[in-house]
Image (tube, coloured by chain):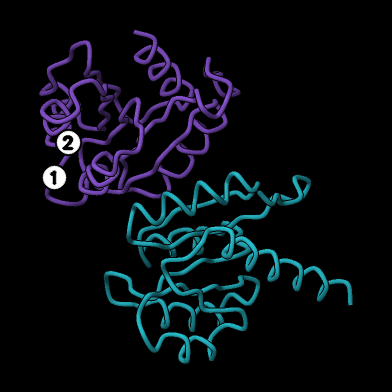
Chain colours: A cyan, B purple
Amino acid sequence: MASADPSATRTVMVVEPDVLVRMVIAEYLRDCGYKVIEAVGSTELWAVLDGGHAIDVLLLEVSLPGDENGFELAHRIRQTRREVDVILTSGVAGTVQHSHELCEEGPIKTPYEPKDVEARIKILLERRRAAKKT
Amino acid sequence: MGPVSATQETDEHRSTVLLVEDELLLRWPTGEYLRDAGYRVIEAATASEAIAVLASGVRVDLVFSDVNLAEEMNGHALASWLASNRPHIPILLTSADRLELCRVTVGAMRATLSKPYDLSAVAERIREMLSR
């Protein structure tokens, strides 16, 4: 299993309404060394972001209960929280095309392999690191 | 104050706590504290999520649940479900409403803890229940 650099623990927020999917990916990412915040939907997501908690990567399911879906949330976050990288996840057909407009690295089709998600997170974090250096 | 260390050390023997709390800003730090204390923690936001986890066959050693949950099914109903379907799993119920906690029939498999709670008290209570 891959592991994150323990000297720089990164926080991943998982927004996923299916508890069983959330449980598996959250545990996998914790085992990889990430700090993970689990959220059910957009209300919880904003409670964390508005509370000033630092999030490095947001793993966001497209189909969410409530008013805002993952696309709309990703759009808002892209505009207002440039420091947060977003990975969209979805099993819905047509999502791929739509998502490319919202995030450079995505989306991930469900059901996904947790290791593929972790690999994607690593790419995004590495890109941030490289951008900071230049 | 640092976390109370769980007696279990290895992954295979870590006790699993199913934490049921609808308020993320409470669920998250509680979960982190219990993980630091050595437990494996599964987070659920509602009683129906908790039942989905229990029904999936994942090993759960103890349920720590808020009584007042956002959906129709509250902590009392979850405790009843557990007594009927998973009678070997103990449940620790918490609430800020003392009258709600008075309604709980405390026994070997059921205990209460009032809110607001110290995280160290939660870990201590769980350790105590699991060692019975």
Mark 1 falls on what kind of element? loop
Q: In this image, B30 relative to B9: left or right?
A: left
Q: What is the three-letter code of the residue carrying label 2?
A: Leu
Q: Which mark is residue A118?
A: none
Q: Quadrant of the N terminus of chain B?
A: top right
**Relative to residue B81, is residue A117 depicted above or below?**
below
Measuring from the top left, give residue A128's x and y in whole percent: 75, 71
A132 or B52: nearer the viewer: B52
- Disc 1 to disc 2, C-alpha distance: 7 Å
Q: What is the three-letter code of the residue carrying label 1?
A: Met
Mark 2 falls on what kind of element? helix
Q: In this image, A7 relative to B12: left or right?
A: right
**Relative to residue B49, is residue B41 depicted above or below?**
above
Q: How packed is label 1: few (under 14 Cα within 10 Å), some, or many (20 or more)?
A: some
Q: Which mark is residue B73?
A: 1
Disc 1 with disc 2 on a shared chain: yes
Question: CB of mark 1 within 8 Å of CB of mark 2?
Answer: yes
Q: Name the residue at 53% across, 18% down.
A: B8
Q: Name the residue at 19% across, 36% down.
A: B75
Q: Which mark is residue B78?
A: 2
**Relative to residue B69, is residue A131 depicted above or below?**
below
Q: Name the residue at 57% across, 56% down.
A: A53
A68 or A25: nearer the viewer: A25
